[in-house]
Amino acid sequence: MFWFRKIMLSSPSSSSSIGKRTSSQPSCFCEVEATLRYSNTPKNPGRPFLGCPKYNNEGLPYCKFFKWADGALDVEQEIEDIKQYLLRREEELRMDKIEFRKRADAMEKMLANILEEVRKQDAQNRRRRTLNNLYWAVAIVVSCYFLVSK
């Protein structure tokens, strides 16, 4: 939350909701530098927040980025958000690991089938060569027999 302290030190006190920017502010989901504004709601009067600079600009799409800029509550929320993100990511990685294991098992089966087919074809080729050699041996013997018997 160091960026917040920098914002508060560099921004004059004001209750206006007009956006102010500093170079240390985070970016919104549109990847545009978020704008510091002040709440004018009865529940949070004057409370600083960061929002998409396109919000409330007629005709411009905005990303609904919103983050309170006053520290303590945000730190706890940020920790919880990070925790939830890490838990989701851990589950995604666990599911990826399961999926990769399934794919690896399937590929091992395919490889075993291919190797078995290669072995069968190799054995078949050896039989063909043996039969071919036997054919030529018989042909030579028969030819010699006819040559000698004349």
Image (cartoon, rainbow, N blue to C red):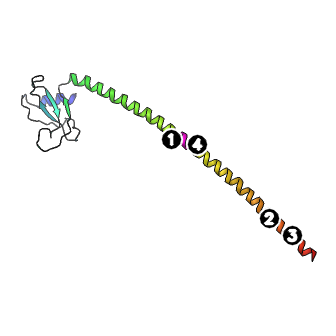
- Please tell me whether mark 1 sits on a helix, a strand or a loop: helix
Q: Quadrant of residue 107?
A: top right
Please give the label number shown on residue 103.
1
| Mark positioned earlier in the residue sequence (4 or 2) | 4
Circles 2, 3 touching at the beta carbon (< 8 Å): no
Q: Is residue 23 left or right of residue 97?
A: left
Residue, disc 2:
135
Please give the label number shown on residue 142.
3
Measured as percent of width and height from the top left, residue 63 is found at 21, 39
Nearer to the camera, 27 or 101: 101
Q: Is residue 59 left or right of residue 142?
A: left
Please give the label number shown on residue 136.
none
- Please tell me whether mark 3 sits on a helix, a strand or a loop: helix
Q: Which residue is pictured at 12% across the width and 32% down the height?
A: 37
Going by the numbered disc 2, the residue's amino acid type is: Tyr
Span of residues in magenta: 103-108
Going by the numbered disc 1, the residue's amino acid type is: Arg
Q: Which residue is pictured at 17% across the width and 43% down the height?
A: 61
Q: Residues within 10 Å of mark 3 (few under 14, many from 20)?
A: few
Going by the numbered disc 3, the residue's amino acid type is: Val
Q: Residues within 10 Å of mark 2 (few under 14, many from 20)?
A: few
Question: How far apart, in angstroms, are the residues tagged by discs 2 and 3?
Answer: 10 Å
Question: How far apart, in angstroms, are the residues tagged by discs 4 and 3?
Answer: 49 Å
Q: Quadrant of the C terminus?
A: bottom right
Circles 4, 2 touching at the beta carbon (< 8 Å): no
- Please tell me whether mark 4 sits on a helix, a strand or a loop: helix
Question: How far apart, in angstroms, are the residues tagged by discs 1 and 3?
Answer: 58 Å
| Mark positioned earlier in the residue sequence (4 or 3) | 4
Going by the numbered disc 4, the residue's amino acid type is: Lys
Tell me the chief SS of the magenta region.
helix
Circles 1, 4 touching at the beta carbon (< 8 Å): no
| Mark positioned earlier in the residue sequence (1 or 4) | 1
